[in-house]
Image (spheres, rainbow, N blue to C red):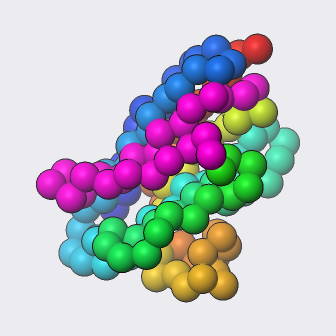
Amino acid sequence: VQLQASGGGLVQAGGSLRLACAASGESARTYAMGWFRQAPGKEREFVATTRWSGGTPYYADIVKGRFTISKDFTKNTMYLQMNSLKPEDTAVYYCAAGRVISTTRTSQSAYPYWGQGTQVTVSS
């Protein structure tokens, strides 16, 4: 599975951005897709995850109600719509794919495939 993340940029606090993660490769849509982020000097943290079909998206508490995952099956692309952005959302955002279950879906180690990361900067 190959993943290509895009859509990062600079935005003011309170603004919005939409990240995209295009998946390719055999059986790409059999994997769950996740978003993680890493701020400078901090460890990478879970943001959100969902399956291509079935189930409901799962979000970290810190983004719940502000971020939304959506999917475009025709483009094999998953999106992360980020609203009401805060300076503390500044990070490199990564998309990932893996065969996860409810107890592993927030763990980086459950996702063997990673995109290259896209920078999101939120100014105050």
Location of the C terminus by quadrant is top right
Residue 56 visible in the picture: yes
In front of the other: 100 or 113: 100
Whole-percent x, y for residue 54 in the image: 36, 76
Residue 103: image quadrant is bottom right
In this rendering, is residue 124 above or below 20? above
Who's the residue at 57% across and 65% down the image? 58
Report how many numbered discs are placed on residues in the image. Answer: 0
Who's the residue at 83% across and 47% down the image? 42
23 left or right of 49 in image = left
Who's the residue at 31% across and 78% down the image? 30
In front of the other: 19 or 57: 57
In this rendering, is residue 9 above or below 78? above
111 left or right of 69 in image = right
Which residue of the protein is positioned furthest toward the right in this rendering? Answer: 41
Whole-percent x, y for residue 63 in the image: 67, 47
Who's the residue at 65% across and 29% down the image? 85
39 left or right of 33 in image = right
73 left or right of 68 in image = left
In this rendering, is residue 110 above or below 95? below
Which residue of the protein is positioned furthest toward the front in this rendering? Answer: 65
Residue 113 visible in the picture: no
In front of the other: 29 or 114: 29
The answer to whether residue 112 is magenta is no
Whole-percent x, y for residue 109 in the image: 64, 76
Whole-percent x, y for residue 34 in the image: 51, 62
Q: Which region is colored magenta?
A: 65-87
Location of the N terminus by quadrant is bottom left
